[in-house]
Amino acid sequence: MSPTSSEPSGLPATSRVAAASARLRLQRDRRRFDRAFWVLVAVLGAASAVFLALGALQGPKLSSAIVDPQRVTEQPGQQLRLFANQPLSEVAPEQVTVTPEVEVTTSVQDDVLIVQFAQPLRAGTEYTVEVAGVGALSRDATSTFRHGFTTAEASVLYLDRGETVDEVLRAPVSGTGRGEVVLAAEGIQHIAPVEGVIVVARDAPGGTSVLEAVAADGGVQRITLPEGVRVDQLIAPPLGGLVGMVLSTPGAVPGDPTTGYSRALAVVDLVADSPVSIVESLDGSPIETLFAQFLPDGATLIAHQVGGTLLRVELAPAPLVLPVGQIPTAFGLSTDATRLTGSDAFGGVVVDLETGRESRLDPSPVDGAFAFGGPALLTRGELRVQKVAVPDPVTGAVATLLVADDGSGAARVLFRTVDDRGSLGDLVLSANDQYVAVEVTPSVAEAEPDGRPVNGRPTSVTTVIVDISTGAVVRTLEGFAPHF
Amino acid sequence: MTQTPADAAARTGDHAAGGNEHEGHSHEGPRRARVVHVVWLVAAVAVLIGIVVVREWTAQNLDAGIPDALQDLLTLSTSVLVESLPFIVLGIALSILVQVWIPEHWLLRILPRNPWGRRAVISLFGMFLPVCECGNVPLARGLVRRGFTVPESMVFLIAAPILNPITIITTHQAFGFDDGILVARLLGGFAIANILGWLFSKHPEPMSLLSGRFAEQCRLDDGHGHSRSRREASLDLFVRESSILMPALVIGALAAGAIQVVVPRDVLVALGSDPLFSVLVMMLLAFIISVCANVDAFFILPFASTFLPGSIVAFLVFGPIVDIKMLALMRTTYSTRTLVQLTTIVALLSLTLGLVVNYLA
């Protein structure tokens, strides 16, 4: 039977046409799909090739950078970490240009280029770091990394005593006003900033002290002192939670332990929440201390013992006391804590703490006039900041000046009081050697004591902050005991 | 208008067409089919348990003389199985929920009529169904049976592992917004899913994109769904989907483990130190290790300092869509030709995306 004979009339031809048409439509649609697929493949392949070529011509790129704008002004060896988009080949320090100029070293860890600053940077300063010729591990193309950052503004913590309530304030080095009150309490003797808290010694009955740690939120933790002692000095660590102090029992006789402590060196660990412990010398007796200061590790003290012996006191894990030198008077450690300044009968002395070697510290003339050297603090370099006394050849009056002296034969005056009527007190250098803070009594003749039994000052005492490089007075604050 | 499995079945004029008349209209066929499914399921579970037990035994008997390569194979395969199995079960459960318990019009009503808008919305389904790619296979199968077109199921399958909250959170935790890796992954996943959806929507015979067996099941479903209770249908679906996916998972895990043994990972890493090849190497690594999208960001994080950001993006985009385990699972649903085309496009798009990120980042 033929196909046509079995179908109703007219349908076979129509259905054949419809089927053929559907088949053709399907074939056309299939071809369209195949065409769309291959066009898409071709477009994507071409796009890949283009970006592959562009990528091959491109050097490494700087993705991000990290630097701690605060710490970089406080500690040497701080790093600027430049994150690249791919592993990098080695970079030499000569490829790095820093503006303003500072000494750097470089290293590469995979995709991170580390620029390490040899010394702390200046505060409140805009730096630009440019690294030329940065290459990838497996490409010849190089590029230049450029990153700018501004260091944090320096600030100073100080104590301003009032009629009834004393205040501890923090003020930026540049600016006006008193700054921000961070703590207010009665009878503050000493302050020491330690890892987010401020340790405060305050007046207690009988000329003794109480010791407190005050947190940023105002919480106060009492630190137990030995019975009936006075805090003569609080020693703040550069890092960590150890706080040093010098303690005395009111009325104690030096050299007679039966009458109590006499300038005994003591320490407390705020992190471990341990009680104050007296540091003992090799013979088991307390160390009678004139002056003490922490080394940068925050766990070792340099102590100047009554009698002139310089001691290195390692506090952890157990106290270890080692003599490192002998000097009648000690002024303070250099900023890098490698040397100590002091004086003997012949004038100023510098003691190298590593070797124990001593060298003379002779003041340079000031404006051609002979100067008598006083307390001096050394920066990391050759420059030192020193109080000097310069006699007037005509009147014979003696002016007390603060000078910067690099040993080249001519000191530069940083500060002097109006008409030279005042006096200069304690000096403190900022960690980056940018500023010196000096306690100033504007007029000795008009000075009135504040009447405090411990750590007294004139009521008119001010703290003057001087930019060492320019000699400009950047801030004057009513108060004393500055801590950068 | 794109053809759905239901449309295709209707067009044949007989749901049991293609030699399945007996299965479609008697009770003997389904019963026999269920027995076959149970046998496959039991066999797959037995193999799975066997792998885990042998791996545990070898770990405790290191001096038993088992070759290191075999131990590595067992460990790597077990890790893929352990990582994927919960998601497979969850995916099957969600698939049953979608197919049996949620009314069809609920799902279809929320979708725009415009094909591009519809696919865009489907590619965001993963935000509400946070299952990794292994679990999305049964879910995608469920969507096809529920009236979605085959290209739409692909859009879901490809986008959902990347555009889901767990993947987004883990990727953000690993990389944050560094080098645009997270943004590129999300945009890349969305773009790849929609481009593929568009491409396959051009196909004149969508049913031919499916594997023969799955296409047949779709036709059978349309003829039987009304005659069973929901509990029976759920149980039936669970047994059937498990019996299909579990063997695929076991085979995929063994293959992924075997290839990792043959091609050591450190060789790939060494090859990838060249930035130009790193994108390709990372895609190859993603293909071989078959790690789930929910955790792959943490896996690749240690490589972030060695490889270019674009290669990391390529890894994070390519891996969830195409890897050994996924190919084994997807083969249960799509034809070989479809998978070749899908793999080609996904690979090219991932490569392009990686190179663009490398250029821009």
Image: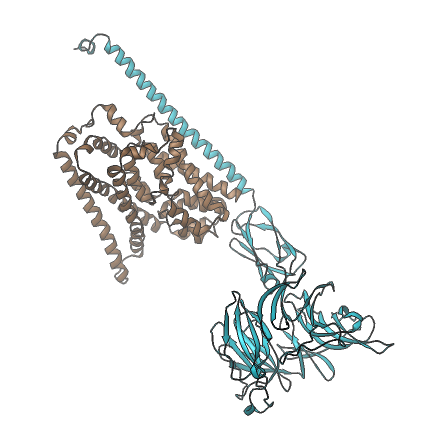
Q: Percent from the top left, x then y, of residue A236?
A: 58, 73
Q: Percent from the top left, x then y, of residue A391?
A: 82, 77
Residue in view at x 26 percent, y 10 percent: A13
Q: Percent from the top left, x then y, of residue A277?
A: 51, 81
Residue in view at x 31 percent, y 29 percent: B206
Q: Is residue B236 above or below residue A174?
A: above
Inspect this view and state whether residue B335 appears: no
Q: Tell me which corner region of the image, top left, top right, bottom left or bottom right, holds residue B141.
A: top left
Give the chain coloured cyan: A
Camera-side residue: A198 or B196?
A: A198
Residue placed furthest toward the front = A164
Residue placed furthest toward the right = A394
Q: Percent from the top left, x then y, of residue B210?
A: 29, 33
Give the chain coloured brown: B
Residue placed furthest toward the top = A9
Q: Tell me which corner region of the image, top left, top right, bottom left or bottom right, holds residue A170.
A: bottom right
Camera-side residue: A476 or B269?
A: A476
Question: Looking at the image, how many numbered discs can be counted on the residues?
Answer: 0
Residue in view at x 47 percent, y 74 percent: A273
